[in-house]
């Protein structure tokens, strides 16, 4: 008698993914109601859920094709649509076409970024992300809104800056700039005692002014990509900035797509 495989989905990782999806949806609703600080914070909460679901799936051996697809859909809402709508309702409404075009550049960049990531599983260098990861781009845009609300700035007065940051984040996502993924860090290894003290110090610094510290941190990370790329090549070419840096990037129509994983996009 053969054992039939039990049908269903794994609860824990998909529950975390649902938490991220809810946070992204909550950010959209909060922005529509003018609660921009809550909307920005919700996007950062979605980042926490996104960072947990894939790792929990690997730790508990509960990875699945359904989970990977669900994770991508959730990321598109939380890190693609939500940040663009939050930025638009806060600071881009007075710019007319320029405002919604900047928001659309971000949304399109996030969609292309996620699609490209899914086609590069097993091909790309795990030490680096090709282009700014969508959660980091979302943190950059949400962090700007959070800082503006914290310092009582009127978003529409700084619409040009908001449009530039939003569009730039979208373009960085589809660039070929190299960003450290930090996946090579051994979280199970031993570290000196002073490392724990440094982690505690980082938490204290973030807690003093979370909006400003997080925005600066992700702004520096966004700028680090172009710097890492330009420093690693002798002569900067167009393929180092945008386009197909590797012939294997585009999946052939007849080829079998690589197996996807729940992971950072």
Image (tube, rainbow, N blue to C red):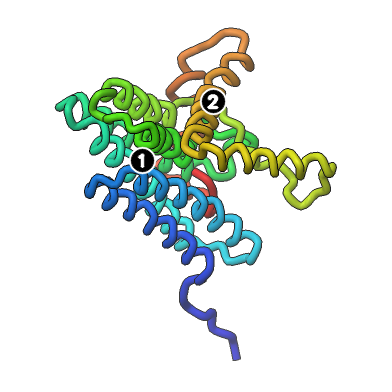
**133 or 95, which lies in front?**
95
Neighbor class of circle 1 (other Cα within 10 Å; few <14, some 14-19, many 20+) is many
The quadrant in which residue 139 appears is top left
**250 or 129, which lies in front?**
129
Identify residue for label 2: 220
Q: Position of residue 228 (x, y in %)?
A: 60, 21
Q: Secondary structure at mark 1?
A: helix
Q: Nearer the viewer, mark 2 or mark 1?
A: 2
Residue farthest toward the bottom in the current orientation of the protein: 1
Q: Position of residue 24 (x, y in %)?
A: 36, 51
Q: Position of residue 159 (x, y in %)?
A: 26, 25
Q: Residue at x 23, y 28 (%)?
A: 156
Compared with residue 108, is residue 175 higher up or lower down, i.e. above or below? above
Neighbor class of circle 2 (other Cα within 10 Å; few <14, some 14-19, many 20+) is few
**217 or 101, which lies in front?**
217
Instruction: Report the Cα–Cα distance between label 2 and label 1.
Output: 23 Å
Residue farthest toward the left in the current orientation of the protein: 96
Q: Residue at x 50, y 55 (%)?
A: 49
- Relative placement, left or right, of 67 versus 154 is right
Compared with residue 238, is residue 81 higher up or lower down, i.e. above or below? below
The quadrant in which residue 122 appears is top right
Q: Residue at x 27, y 41 (%)?
A: 85
Residue 169 has which mark?
none
- Relative placement, left or right, of 109 versus 249 is left
Identify residue for label 1: 111
**111 or 40, which lies in front?**
40
Classify the position of the N terminus by image quarter.
Answer: bottom right
């Amino acid at each position: 008698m053969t054992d039939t495989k039990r049908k269903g989905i794994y609860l824990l990782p998909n529950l975390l993914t649902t938490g991220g999806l809810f946070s992204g949806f909550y950010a959209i609703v909060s922005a529509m109601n003018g609660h921009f600080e809550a909307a920005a914070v919700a996007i950062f909460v979605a980042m926490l859920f996104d960072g947990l679901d894939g790792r929990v799936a690997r730790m508990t051996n509960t990875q699945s094709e359904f989970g990977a697809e669900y994770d991508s859909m959730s990321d598109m809402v939380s890190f693609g649509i939500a940040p663009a709508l939050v930025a638009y309702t806060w600071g881009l409404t007075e710019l007319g076409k320029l405002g919604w075009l900047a928001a659309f550049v971000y949304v399109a960049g996030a969609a292309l970024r996620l699609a490209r990531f899914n086609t590069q599983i097993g091909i790309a260098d795990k030490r680096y992300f090709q282009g700014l990861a969508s959660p980091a781009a979302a943190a950059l845009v949400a962090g700007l809104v959070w800082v503006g609300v914290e310092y009582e700035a009127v978003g529409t007065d700084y619409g040009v800056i908001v449009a530039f940051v939003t569009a730039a984040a979208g373009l960085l996502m589809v660039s070929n700039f190299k960003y450290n993924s930090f996946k090579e860090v051994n979280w199970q290894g031993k570290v000196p005692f002073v490392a724990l003290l440094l982690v505690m110090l980082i938490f204290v610094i973030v807690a003093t002014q979370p909006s400003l510290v997080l925005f600066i941190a992700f702004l520096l990370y966004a700028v680090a990509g172009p710097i890492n790329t330009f420093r690693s090549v002798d002569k900067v070419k167009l393929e180092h900035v945008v386009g197909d840096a590797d012939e294997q990037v585009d999946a052939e129509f007849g080829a079998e797509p690589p197996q996807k994983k729940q992971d950072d996009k």
